[in-house]
Amino acid sequence: MALDPKRTRQLRAMLRRLSAANAISSIPGGTGKALEAWVFMTLADAARQKTGWQVTLHQGDGSRLPPNHPFVFSGGPSGLSQAVGDPCFARLHRSGGSEPRTLELHHGLQHKGRSGARHEWDIALLPTEIPQGIRATNAQYPRGLPFLGIECKDKLRSGNSDEMRQTLARMFDLAHVTQLRGSVTHRMMDEHGTAGTGRRWPTYLENYSHGAFGVVHVGGFQLGPRDMSDHYKIQRFGHVTTSNTATRNALEVSMSRVLDRIDQLY
């Protein structure tokens, strides 16, 4: 569905603050795409406001997005962007702290699971070493759990258990627990295993809790998925239209917490 006027104004303001084109035509059409754009920019803008972090927007080939140029949003599940005209992304850089850190915030990016299946995250935060390795080898898909992964559901009805199970199944197939041997050596790796980074933990639940994962739902959530998400550390962001400020604040807090403990994830 289309964004309501309040979220439309918010999205345009966030695009403007990050120096991208912000006319009404800059908001993507297609089922659920405007919601994904609003969530993406809410997270990017939260990082922009974080002390010590700088956020810049980039084209698909990695070059800086020129001022007032359209930010290309993903039209559907895909591999990593490789060229100008492909979906854009945001680069988050911290120059201070114990050591510099650079992350990339992507949308519509598929990840490759241990089973070989591909799973899309509507929004995903990755250490830059992974997409750089993918670009260098002309590959397509990252492997492993991102530092942050969000699924967006542009549905007025309440989220049910089946939707939460889908998110949990995605997380399970992507998790690289420490017991895994062979070619799996890091939390995240490129498709060919030539680049890898990120700390792993012994249990699936520990890997889920060290990061941020959630479902954004225009409606609320039924009781079943609430219990499931609480146990498996999957955040719920519901009632987007009726509780706009609360949902936006919760997304900003989620991004802020990941950045606060980013050194623990490496």
Image (tube, rainbow, N blue to C red):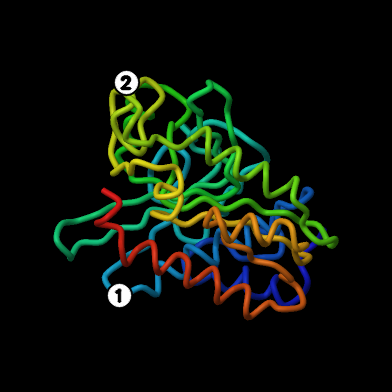
* Image coords of residue 145 (percent x, y): 44, 41
The secondary element bearing badge 1 is classed as: loop
Q: First in sequence, mark 1 or 2: give its number.
A: 1
* Residue picked out by circle 1: 51
- Residue at 53% x, 22% y is 115
* Image coords of residue 27 (percent x, y): 68, 59
The secondary element bearing badge 2 is classed as: loop
Relative depth, front residue between 255 and 76: 255
Graded by Cα atoms within 10 Å as few (under 14), some (14 to 19) or many (20 or more), the crowding at tag 1 reads: few
Rendered position, 181 above or below 121: above
Rendered position, 174 above or below 31: above
* Image coords of residue 251 (percent x, y): 54, 68
- Residue at 43% x, 35% y is 144
Rendered position, 34 above or below 253: above
How many tags in the picture?
A: 2
- Residue at 81% x, 57% y is 155
Q: Closer to us: mark 1 or mark 2?
A: 2
Q: Amino acid at mark 1?
A: Thr
* Image coords of residue 51 (percent x, y): 30, 75
Q: CA distance from mark 1 to mark 2?
A: 37 Å
Relative depth, front residue between 127 and 225: 225
* Residue picked out by circle 2: 183
